[in-house]
Each structure stands twice: as C-alpha cells, then as structure tokens.
Amino acid sequence: MKIIFVRHGLTMANIEKKYSTPETKLEESGLYILDKTKEHLKNYEIDEVYTSGLIRSQETAKILGFDKYLVDERLNEMDFGDFKGKSIFEVREDYKNFFEQEKEAYFDLSYPNGESRRDVIKRLSSFLDEKSNNDKNILCISHGIAIRSSLFWILKDLSNWQSFWIDNGSLTVYNIKDNKKLIESVNII
C-alpha cells in the first residue's frame, strides 16, 4: 500500500509570508502548480482521499479532481496559535523572546495558544498508524509542516528536521509493505 501526501496549492499567505488561518484559500494565480501534481498522481491508483479540516486542502482536492474525500483534522497544519494571520517577519520582531526560547526547545515549545512540532508529529503518526493497517492506497492533502512531521513517523532522529522542505503541490510518498515503512519519495514537484 502507498500513502501519498500532497501539499495544498499556493495561497496568498504563502506569497505574503504570513502564518495561515483556517480560512486561508488558494490563490488563483498559483493554481498552475497543481497541473503538475495532477500529472504525477496519474502514476498512482488511489482508493481513498483524505484532506485536513482546512479550506485550502479541500479546495486542492477538488481541483485535483477528487470531489469525494474524508476530512481528518489530524492532517491539519501546525496550529500557530496567536500568530495566525500575522506576518512571519513582524512576529519574529515582536516576539523575540519566544524565538529565543524556541532555539532551546525547538520541538517541545508550543506556539502561544497553539501546538509544538512534537504535537504535530504525534498527531500525524496517529493518523499514519491507523491508516497503514488498511490495504488501500491513500491520498492525503495536507500542509508543509504537517507533511514534514509525517516523515518522522519513520525517521526517529529529529536532527534531520531541517533537511526537508515540502513545496506547494508536491508529493511525498510512503510505501508500506510486509510491515515495513519506507519513504519512497519526498517533495516531488
């Protein structure tokens, strides 16, 4: 079985370097990115489709031609709490103390009224543990940090965190066979 992750299409928050909100929608000028995604997905037989609870992932599913999907909030992006909707640059300036603390506890420090990276890793691992027991090829439309977190369902060494980037519209594929979890590809664009 395969579990295929796709990062949602481009949003204005991505372009403007802002923390997204649950209402963030796809940016029409970036929809061309999903044309390549569609082509890549033709290489896979997909039995089930899941999206996060966030609008941009559901819009992406529809643009990719998947009108029937299940929503699972474990696929949501990291909850940035009080930073949602704010400029990344302004937040870094206004909350210097938080980012100093983050250097010491990168995976365990929760964003104010939000989540930590370790929370997201646990949430994605719960989803993957559950779905990897099915014998179906699953497409999951999710988010950058969420998909990066999913890699650590297999990889246990968090020092590799900075080695990965997940682009809008890219595919990350896991192959689960004979109780072995393999990373088949990361960030296919």
Image (cartoon, rainbow, N blue to C red):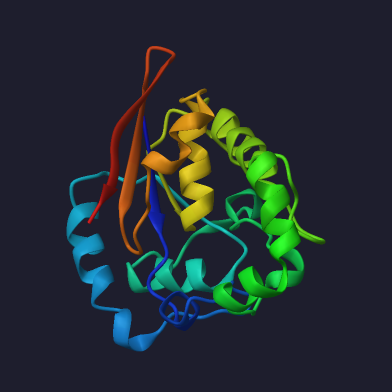
Residue 117 placement (x, y as % from top left): 64, 45
Total labels drawn: 0
Residue 16 placement (x, y as % from top left): 46, 82
- Residue in front for this viewpoint, 38 or 172: 172
Residue 169 placement (x, y as % from top left): 32, 62
- Residue in front for this viewpoint, 80 or 143: 80
Q: Identify the residue at image location x=51%, y=81%.
A: 25
Is residue 63 positioned above or below 136 on the image? below
Residue 3 placement (x, y as % from top left): 40, 38
- Location of residue 15 (image quadrant): bottom left
Q: Identify the residue at image location x=46%, y=25%.
A: 155
Is residue 146 positioned above or below 163 on the image? below
Q: Identify the residue at image location x=75%, y=60%.
A: 97
Q: Quadrant of the C terminus?
A: bottom left
- Location of residue 82 (image quadrant): bottom right
Is residue 2 positioned above or below 63 on the image? above
Q: Is residue 76 visible?
A: yes
Is residue 7 positioned above or below 176 on the image? below
- Residue in front for this viewpoint, 36 or 45: 36
Q: Quadrant of the N terminus?
A: top left
- Residue in front for this viewpoint, 4 or 46: 4
